[in-house]
Every structure is written in C-alpha cells, then in structure tokens.
Amino acid sequence: MVALAITSVGYHLWLVMAGLIPHLISRPLHIIATIPFVFIFTAHRATGWRRAVDVLLCALGLAACIYVLMQHDMLDNQYGRLRSTTQFVVAWGLILLALEMARRQVKWAMPITAGLALLYGLFGQHLPGELGHAGIPLASFLGTLTITEGGLWGSLTGVSAEVVAVFVILGAIVSAGEGGQGFMAASVAVAGRLRAGAAKVSVLSSALFGSISGSASANVASTGAITLPTMKRLGYPPALAAAVEAVASSGGQIMPPVMGAGAFIMVELLRTTYNEVLMAALLPAVLFFWGVWAGCDLYGRRYGLEPMRGEDIPPFAKVARLVLFFVIPFGLLLGILFLSGNTPQYAGAAAAGAAAALLLFDERLRPSLSRWRTRLIDAAVSAARQIATIAAIIFCAGLIIGVLNITGLGVKITSLILGLSGGNLWGALLLTGLACLILGMEVPTTAAYVICVAVAGPALIEIGVEPLHAHLFIFWFALLSTITPPVCGAVFIAAGMAGAPWLKVAVHAMSLGIGLYIVPLAFIANPALTALGSTPWLALAACVKIGLGVWMISRGLIHREALPLRGGWIVAGIVVIFSFGI
C-alpha cells in the first residue's frame, strides 16, 4: 500500500512537469493508481469471499484500463466506434467499474443517477414526445463513452489527474506536519481574546484548514477535535458548539484557493483562467465566514460566552514558529499563481515541495530524519486515498456528462426548466437551487455541482445569468445539504463528537450559516461582488452592502428581542441586500 501510495503521488507530481502526454495514457494511469485504494486498501477490508470479489474486481478494472493504455493509438483512429468483441467487453467493464467505484466511495445515489442516464442513452429512442432521442448505434454510444475523450476519459478526469490530485497532495503534506497546529495557533492568537472567542477560533481555523482540505467532514474531524472540547469546557451549549464547527467546516469548500476541487473543474467547464475563478469566489466566501463570525458574536451575547482563558492562548513565539509551516507553502503557492505565468498545478507542486521539506522539523524547528520519513509516508497514503475518492466521483460523473452530450438530454432539461419557471429568473434559480439541494443530499458537493451545472447551468445562462455566476450559484447551493436537514453530513459528525441532538444542532447551524442561503442570491442581484479582479472598488462596495444585510438577517434570527423587531431586522437585511443592486 505504501509503495503504491508513493508511486501515485510521484506520478501525479511528475505529470505537472511531463509536458504533453496523450490523454488515453495519462488518464488511464490516473485511474489505475486509484483502483487498488477503492477495492483493496480500504479502511475496513473485507474477509472471506467478499475479499476474493474485491481482488477480482480490482484485477478486472486494472485489465480494462491497461487495455486502453496499451491500445491508445488504435483506439484514437476508431473515432469512437467499437470494432471487436474484446472492445465491447472492455467498454462494459469500464462502465461497470465507474459505477462500482462510485458506489463504494459515495454510496448509491450517484451510480443510480449514472445508471438511469445510461438507460436513457440505450433506450431513450422509445420514449414519446420531445424527451426521446433518435437512437444511437450501440458501438458508437459505448465507444464514445469508453475509448474517446467524450465520456470516462473526458476533461473532468483530466482535471482530476492533472490538477486536483496535486492540490490534494499539497493538503495532505501540510496536514501531516505542523501546518494544522499552525492554523489553530494563529486562529487562537487572533480571535481567542474576543467574545465567544472559542467559536471564532473555530471559524478562522476552519477557513484556513478548509481552504486546502476542501472537505467538510475532514475539517470537522480535524479542527473539531480541538475546538469542540474547548467550547464545551468554556460553557457553550453542546448543540451550539457542534453547529459552529459544522458550519465553519462546510465553508472550506467555497474558500479559495482549492474549493474542494470545484475551482479547477469550474475552470475546465468555463474554459476560463484559474485566477478569474479565484477572484470571483473570494469575496462571497469571505461574506459567508463573516456571517458565521457575526452569528457567533450574537450567540456570544445571547449566552454570555466569554473569551478563551489566558492559559489556552499560545505565546507569540510559538505562534510565530508554527505559522511558518503554512505561510511558507501558501505564500509560495499564491506568489507563483499571481506573479508568474505558470499553471495552478505547477504552483501546487512547488508548494507541496516546500511543505514536504518543512515536514523535517517539529514545532521547535528541530530536524529529525526518522520523523520526516514517517510523515512523508503518512502524507502519501492520505493523499492517495483522497485522490482515489475524488477520482471515483469524477470518473462516474464523466459517464453522466457523456450521456447528456451524446443524447442532447441536457438541452431538453434546460427547456423544461425554462418552461416550468415561465422564463422568470428567480423561478429558475429556485428550481435549480432545489435540484442542487436534493442531489447534494446523497453525493459530495463537487459531484452534485458537476451534474447540476450540466443540466441546469445552460438554463440559467439562457435566462440571462452570467456563466461564472451560474456556476458559482450552483456550486454554493450544492453545498446546502451539509447543514440542511434531512441529510446534513457535517451536522451529524459534529453532533456525534459533541454529544448533542442532531436536530438542535441543525437549527443552530442553519441560523449561523444563513450566508450559505443568501450570498448566492446576493451575487446574482449584485454582480459586481464577483468582479474583484476588474472593478475592485465596486466589488468591495457590494461586499460591504451585502455584509451589512447578512448581519441584519443574522441579528433577526439569533438575537433575543421582541418578535416584531426580529422580523424587522430580517426584512431590513433583505431590502439592503437586494435593493439597488451593484
């Protein structure tokens, strides 16, 4: 396992420097590196006959990918049409591999969605009316999905292999050393002495850690292990403590530079630059965390929550040492991104190299070769597992996108959304947001975003929403299910860690995370908010206006006042945000 993990990390970093490699070589190698971590090297390994099935599935999956790899020249010349029984067997094997990998990583919702898409592609010609299609020859349909760049080996898998994997490696390396402590120490030093200091520390540390981890559950498990006991010890109601951690941790997926891999997929789908997506996403993410911060302060007044104790706040010298472990790689990452013409993956690889060198040192800057070796191995295994999880999701998503493109179903769904909304912008946004919430209940945010943007994105764009705004809106609303019942993953994890009733945690989480519901609508009404790169002063003005409105709505939801007054604060906040758009 360790050998494969190191090989996987080495391969994905090598891809950054390797130049042009045929896609039917680089992308199958990416999946080959992930298959054993899905079927064999799992957290809870099967025994008996189930273990034998896992080994068999792993072997068959590897064989199918190796066939594509070895025959890539011939397959390129077939123009997406299968020509032999062997190729049909390989095609069906790859499709079943994509479905089973997704099932093992994210349960049933995504493979069922992909299965329904496949059934539509195979039998949709028998459907009456506009929803049907003209029919596609089986050899061409399966070939386009499995031996060309129109399905499994499409651009999404390319993003997973060439960009996302590099940033996953960066996050794993930073987390394996003192970087996590650095996030926490800096957050405590900045916010620990304020009212509700422990909650605000959770907000800052989750924003910092989440910006590279991009995973709400990983964020809750890591920062929550420190912040939840501290909040409970200081007298926070357990449900509030869990809600703070759940909401703050969810925000990591919308915080640049990584955004849970969403930023890089957005770049590919929009055919834009990484810097444009980063600059557009920055102020909305800041507003989300401002809303959580303001909510923590209001809850602090409501419950009389005091600052953290002096003995819990680290001395300046310790903070100064620890922040180096994330400031150096992050500074290098941002410096290369904004000051050079190099790609995001090159910047991520350089930052990963710097973070790997820092693993040699402990918090007192004392070197140790044995500790360095152990940390590098831990980082490699963690990165390989995370790469496998994301690859399984994106591999299956490529199947869905491929069917939508081949059959034209995406265009038909766009027409349906436009028809149901009556051409009304806010009606289309409501329908799209509802679809994102439902889909996000069972699949990760990134997968929900990819699927929703393929079917609903064109409808929003056709009705007048800017493409970048449409993508950001869908990405944000795909995140709603992390804190919104009935399936609120981050809430369940935090509630379990804090020993609090999950429904009570969810109620607090929705009031703290009100920005997650409001900000996406706000940047549709105030498009200047996402134009930080081109019109910074207008963007900052829109940020201040929306930030004031978010605070007013938070006050109405959280602060203990007469009910009419609370309603007045909420209405006033909505008016401030949505009137006089900037």
Image: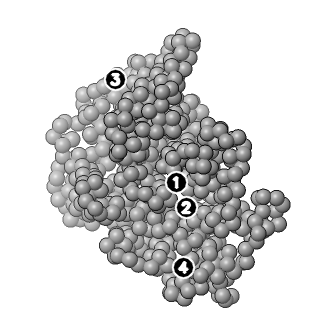
Q: Are marks 3 and 4 in contact (CB under 8 Å)?
A: no
Coordinates of residue 107 in the picture (x, y in percent): 62, 57
Quadrant where the C terminus lies? top left
The residue indicated by pointer 1 is: 446
Left or right of residue 6, residue 56 in this image: right
3D distance between C-alphas at marks 1 and 4: 24 Å
Q: Residues within 10 Å of mark 4 (few under 14, many from 20)?
A: many
Query: Which comes sooner in the sequence, label 1 or label 3?
Result: 3
Q: Residues within 10 Å of mark 1 (few under 14, many from 20)?
A: many
Tell me the tag on residue 65: 4
The residue indicated by pointer 3 is: 195
Amino acid type, callout 4:
Cys
Query: Which comes sooner in the sequence, label 2 or label 3?
Result: 3
Coordinates of residue 270 in the picture (x, y in percent): 48, 57
3D distance between C-alphas at marks 4 and 2: 17 Å
- Relative to 120, is 490 above or below? above
3D distance between C-alphas at marks 1 and 3: 35 Å
Left or right of residue 533, residue 263 in this image: right
Q: Residue at x 45, y 64 (%)?
A: 159
Q: Are marks 2 and 1 in contact (CB under 8 Å)?
A: yes
3D distance between C-alphas at marks 3 and 4: 56 Å
Query: Which comes sooner in the sequence, label 3 or label 4?
Result: 4
Quarter-of-image position of residue 8: bottom left
Tell me the tag on residue 393: 2
